Image (tube, rainbow, N blue to C red):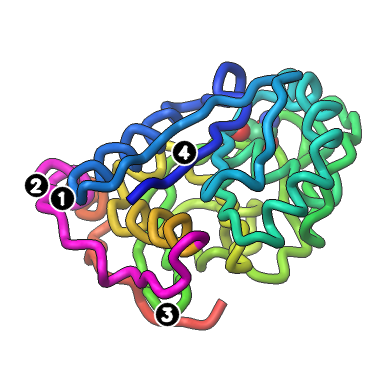
Amino acid sequence: MIVKCAWMYHDIMDLYGDKGNIMTLTSRASQRGIDFQVTTVGIGQEADLSDFDLVFMGGGADKEQVALIPDLLSRKDNIRKAMDENTFFLLICGGYQLFGQYYETADREKIEGLKFADYYTATGKAKSRCIGNIIIDAPLDGINLRLIGFENHGGQTMNVAHPLGKVVHGYGNSFDGGYEGYYDGHILGTYLHGPLLPKNGQLADFVLTKAIQKRNPEFTFDMLAPIDQPWEGIARKALLDRWKLEDKAEVHNS
Ligand code: GLN
């Protein structure tokens, strides 16, 4: 089986080890005999995103977001086509922000977004940022996961119709909203860096499943054989122990 992944703006959108997400997907796929093929797509590079099963975009500073936005907007029709054809989108922080209505930089420059969702991201209070470790509980199509990450963003994302999860520790979409990220079945956007997937192996498998489903609609999450991950387990436990939390999501409706 082959999974084709487009890695958007790999050279400029890669904060806090976001590339680790690609490494994790490649490794977890290959352990199941799946050929995970990665194609990088930079500014000005021709690509038909609807050819891919998964599109990944990491986070970045305001400067990079301003630099790439004309290129991203020029791909809007192609991105819509990809979504209509069930390509899955995994977006981290700065990438997540740009799929909404708009993003307002720390200098209050308003950048138009792709508008694939109703959420928008406004500048927070001067010099205040949501920074630190974050833990959320995410009910993903009935699979309840406790996710661990690290966030560092000034932008405050509001009007999120379908949050990814409920904040257990940390901030999330805004300082006091209590919810984190966005998930609508086609797009998974989140502020979790760290990077996200090495710390959350089950989420990596969920993303793989969504990507596989483009060409194999009958494929389900439980068809991926479990992977022994002793080091990831130790890392998760060390973080969760800090806040005396179990490695088990509390079921809730977000
Ligand atoms: N520049 C954006 C912000 O500060 C995104 C940062 C990020 O990707 N970590 O809100």
How far separated are the C-alphas under marks 2 and 3? 25 Å
Using residue 169 as the reference point, say whether residue 84 is left or right of it. Answer: right
**Residue topped by disc 3:** 142
Q: What residue type is labelled 1?
A: Gly
| The magenta segment | 214-237
Q: Along the polypeptide, which appears first: circle 2 or circle 4? A: 4
Q: In this view, does 235 lie to the left or right of 24?
A: left
As drawn, the label of residue 230 is: 2
Residue 74: image location, x then y, percent: 85, 33
Q: Which of marks 3 and 1 is nearer the N terminus?
A: 3
- Badges 1 and 2: C-beta atoms under 8 Å apart? yes
Q: What is the C-alpha distance between the residues marked 2 and 4?
A: 21 Å
Q: In which quarter of the image is the C terminus?
A: bottom right
Give the x, y percent position of residue 207: 43, 55
Q: Dot 4 corresponds to which residue?
A: 193
Q: Residue at x 55, y 23 (%)?
A: 10
Q: What residue type is labelled 4?
A: His
Element on which disc 2 rests: helix
Q: Can residue 133 be seen at all in this image of the molecule?
A: no
Q: Which of marks 3 and 4 is nearer the N terminus?
A: 3
